[in-house]
Amino acid sequence: MIGSYREALKFVYDHIPTELNKKFAGQFGHERAVHLLALLGDPQNSLKVVHVAGTSGKGSTAFYISQLLAAHGFTVSLTVSPHLIDIRERCQINNRLISKKEFVETLNQIAPKITKMERSRYGKSSYFDLMIALFFQFSANNKVDYAVVETGLGGLYDSTNTIKRSDKLCVITRIGLDHTEILGNSLDKIARQKSGIIQKNNTLITHRQVKPVRSVFEKRVKEKKGSLIYAREKLEGLELNSPALYQRENCSLALTALYHLGERDEFKVDRNKIRRTLLEAHFPGRMDVFVKRGRTVIADGAHNKQKMASFIKSLKNLTKKKIPFLVAFKEGKKYKAMLNEIIPAASDIIVTSFITKGMDLTIKSEKGEMIVDYLKKKKISKMIFIPDNKKAVKELLKKKSKYVAITGSLYLLSAVYSIIRSKVKVDNRYGNRSLKRNRKQLGRNSFYSHFNANAFLDG
């Protein structure tokens, strides 16, 4: 019996592989997740699920869908990965994190089955398997109206791809070249992996993507006797609580999902509720804008070329001037392609590093020396490598620039948010309105308040 939240975290963390960047388990890993959930009685199949996959924007899209459904009076659970600060971000209902008490209670429900599985041919559960199982059990316990599920890596062999319901709604965001060593080195190969979430009679909502991707999606939907809906721009007359241009596309997907569910499940979609929700909803780590020590900090977890290009485009809407950047990239990412997007917008670049704790895998950043060497080849003279990311943040905030940027990885943001989000002022010109709500309204377990008790309030 797990007696405390600290013991619960230890149990979960014991399932993190000790080796760095452990190889993706593929089909075997998927079978293991299926087996674990079967031992639990398949709680995922008791839920109405919106399943979100894609290369860019899947976390934001899942977040917007959950917010919009909650605004219409539904009880909606949400799981995202990776989490930014608190593991409980992976289990939340209507923007409130699972309480520490309920985390322990739910883990005690599933722990005996996790231990039992260790004696089977599947062996030890992965951290991600465990957390997805905990999320599904948590959602079932709370009898939620909808569960919004962001995939981890890929789709076909993902631990979330265990829902066997014909009414599952699939949403797939923009497909790009990322995780190519696992998912394939072409758009159609990656699309085949992502489209693996589409099961019998499922409906797919997606953008009208490039032809190789579109062909894969259409073929999969036809094979599964499902239906396909292409999202269109639905933001006319609506204002987003984000300066990120890429969120318009993610919101369009979320709104298409909302209208589809309204028609299918016979509830009325309220335009005023949509308007209020989008004015307040902001997904942390995606183009956060705030003032720290007199600097306007713009933080974004962009971690591939596609996302970085979108971030830089949005950044140019805030300032046309070149500004200082703090960067670090996950080991194995195509950092040169991302730097090529950053360099034209950067006055100078601080390179730093990170290593994760409490995430799915032990993940470290790309060697700073390699990044510096590449910047030298690009004839970037104003740069420095500061391995300690806390010291790197302090150096960034010394820069004589109105704006500074932090980007390259959500893992970098996770590592430095405890510093950069403490005692900050929200820059009201660029939204983040929900971050100003008072602490009482947010509550102790809100998605925002757990960063720092006062981090999202003026002062």
Image (cartoon, rainbow, N blue to C red):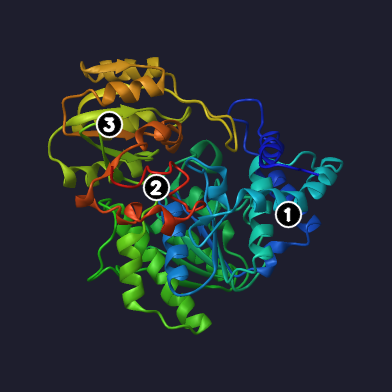
**Residue 73 seen in this snapshot:** yes
**Residue 154 vertical position relative to residue 70 in the rendered view, above or below:** above
Give the x, y percent position of residue 87.
56, 43
The 10 Å Cα crowd at callout 1, few under 14, some 14 to 19, many 20 or more, is some
**Three-letter code for the amino acid on which mark 1 is drawn:** Val
Total marks placed: 3
Which residue bears the numbered disc 1? 34
Q: Alpha-carbon distance for marks 1 and 3?
A: 41 Å
Q: Is residue 202 left or right of residue 405?
A: right
Query: What element does badge 2 sit on?
Result: loop
**Three-letter code for the amino acid on which mark 3 is drawn:** Asn
Give the x, y percent position of residue 130.
69, 46
Which residue bears the numbered disc 3? 340
| 2 vs 3, front mark | 2
Query: What element does badge 1 sit on?
Result: helix
Label disc, if present, on residue 284 of the rendered structure = 2
**Three-letter code for the amino acid on which mark 2 is drawn:** Pro
Label whose residue precedes the other's in the sequence (2 or 3): 2
**Residue 76 vertical position relative to residue 86 in the rendered view, above or below:** below
Q: Quadrant of the N terminus?
A: top right
Label whose residue precedes the other's in the sequence (2 or 1): 1
Q: Quadrant of residue 306?
A: top left
